Amino acid sequence: MEENVIFNTEDVTNNKIMGILAYLGVLVLVPIFAAKDSQYARFHANQGLVLFISSIILFFTSAIITFIVGIITFGLLAVPITIILYLAVFAFWVAFIVMGIMNACSGEPKKLPLIGNITIIK
């Protein structure tokens, strides 16, 4: 969806909660299934789904990096690296959730930075 698309005011009003739910992890499934006909809800469900999947990928990548660093350093740097990586991933996740919810509340099709151009749900 292009940034210059304007949503129907009634669609935004009726589905603002669905847009917010889209950014709350597994709750992204609610707008996917409950608001299939809403262009507004589907836009935010796509953004939320991309965020959810990218967060899972980042957490697993962090675990793999931590495991490799632990093996290489005989466990000496495993704890500090784990703390740093997981705090960074958590900060990314929370910041993007807040941005997504703010975008959903605004009623405009603002994409999330870095991951917003990925389309899973059309």
Image (cartoon, helix red, strand yellow):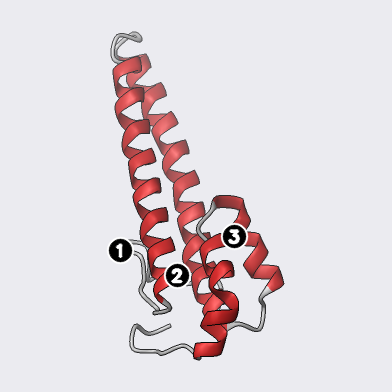
Is 97 situated left or right of 18 in this image?
Answer: left
Give residue 9's position: percent from left, percent from top: 49, 89
Q: Residues within 10 Å of mark 2 (few under 14, many from 20)?
A: many
Q: Amino acid at mark 1?
A: Pro
* Viewport quadrant of the N terminus: bottom left
Q: Amino acid at mark 3?
A: Val
Give residue 53's position: percent from left, percent from top: 51, 53
Residue at image coords 57%, 67%: 17
Residue at label 3?
A: 28
Label 1: which secondary element: loop
Question: Is residue 112 depicted above or below 66 in this figure?
Answer: below
Q: In front: 103, or 75?
A: 103
Label 3: which secondary element: helix
Q: In front: 21, or 49?
A: 21
Q: If you read the primary sequence from the N terminus, does the residue marked by circle 1 or circle 2 appear first?
A: 2
> Quarter of the image holding residue 18?
bottom right
Question: Is residue 3 depicted above or below 82 in this figure?
Answer: below
Mark closer to the observer (2, 3): 2
Q: If you read the primary sequence from the N terminus, does the residue marked by circle 3 or circle 1 appear first?
A: 3
Q: Give me the disc on residue 70.
A: none
Residue at label 1?
A: 113
Residue at label 2?
A: 104
